[in-house]
Image (spheres, grey):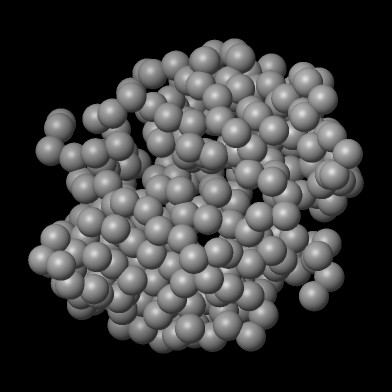
Amino acid sequence: MNKNTSIHNLITTGFASFLPLVVLLLVACAPDPTPQRTALDDQPAQMLSAFFGLDNALPSLRFKNVDGMPVTFSKRVQDPGSLEPSAFTVITRSGARVQPLHVTTRPAQAPSKRHTVLLIGEFGNEPEDPPVKVEVTGHLLLAGGEDAQGLSVAVTPLKNGPSLIMAYSVSPGDFADDFPLETKQIVVVVWNGGVTPVEGVTRDNHRLGYSFETVDGDSVQPIALGDIGGDNYEYLFLDTEAAVLRVSMKSGLLMDPRADANPATSVAVAAVSDSP
């Protein structure tokens, strides 16, 4: 597959793979404008990743053939409308410091998401002078009023495929989307870049690629997936009440917008917070 496959084609592929899920028996929950707190909200904010996703290949009508770099925080952006490009500085291998042309929480802009900000601009070129670090050099308020200014993270190189960087539990009663009736708990997984299934990967291949380590020492798998394609979030529905500690994904099942496949990857699952 062409490494510069357009985001639009990849999103279409992801959407098509999602369609068979609608035949599942679903139960709807009313949207909750206040996302449920997790253990991550009780800890100091972190800048978890900066993913060099596209180099001179962003298919945007307004910003064509520039770079795309999603950066992800452990807490949600408090007000996406207040985001300013000047809040971010990208440092290249040569030491050049540049700021984005535009920043947005799209496409992961739902109130229950918003951990990720997409930086759009010219951030150096691979392999001559790629970006190596992203800093928050301006004010950026996160959920709870914490300012992300001063946070920084190393950039994941362009050639690397997407990896899991965060996962958190959600109670079905507080979930704002549809899910199978037999669901007893939901885990939201967050990747460092947008993901869609690799060409030829079936819905069951995708689902069974995920596994969970439970507090009982068992290994369980989701009964269904949701929110496939379009951003860096996926919903994993489980029919067990055993608390899950860690989620893993096999290699080679998902790909980023350049069609780089994921490595084997895993991350701890943050529990629902007991704090008000």
Q: x, y percentage for residue 217?
A: 15, 67
For residue 88, say whether it is visible: yes
Out of 254 and 114, give the one closest to the viewer.
254
Q: Quadrant of the N terminus?
A: bottom right
Kindly identify the residue that appears in the image at 24 percent across and 65 percent down. Answer: 213
In percent of width and height, residue 10 lies at 70, 68
Q: Quadrant of residue 49?
A: top right
Number of callouts in the render?
0
Using residue 101 as the reference point, say whether residue 234 is left or right of it: left
Q: Residue at x 71, y 59 (%)?
A: 257
In the image, 23 versus 159, the foreground residue is 159
Q: Quadrant of the C terminus?
A: top left
**x, y (%) of residue 51?**
63, 44
State whether residue 14 is above or below residue 86.
below
Instruction: Name the residue nearer the viewer: 92 or 84.
Output: 92
Residue at the image point whose x is 72% and y is 66% from the top: 259
Note whether residue 242 is visible. Answer: no
- Report which quarter residue 52 is drawn in: top right
- Judge left or right: residue 150 versus residue 9: left
The x, y position of residue 241, in whole percent, is 13, 67
Q: Measuring 53% from the left and 71% from the top, which residue is drawn there?
A: 251
Viewer-side residue, 129 vs 77? 129
- The picture quadrant where one finds residue 33 is top left
**On the picture, is 19 further left or further right than 94?**
left
Q: Is residue 168 placed above or below 239 in the rendered structure? A: above
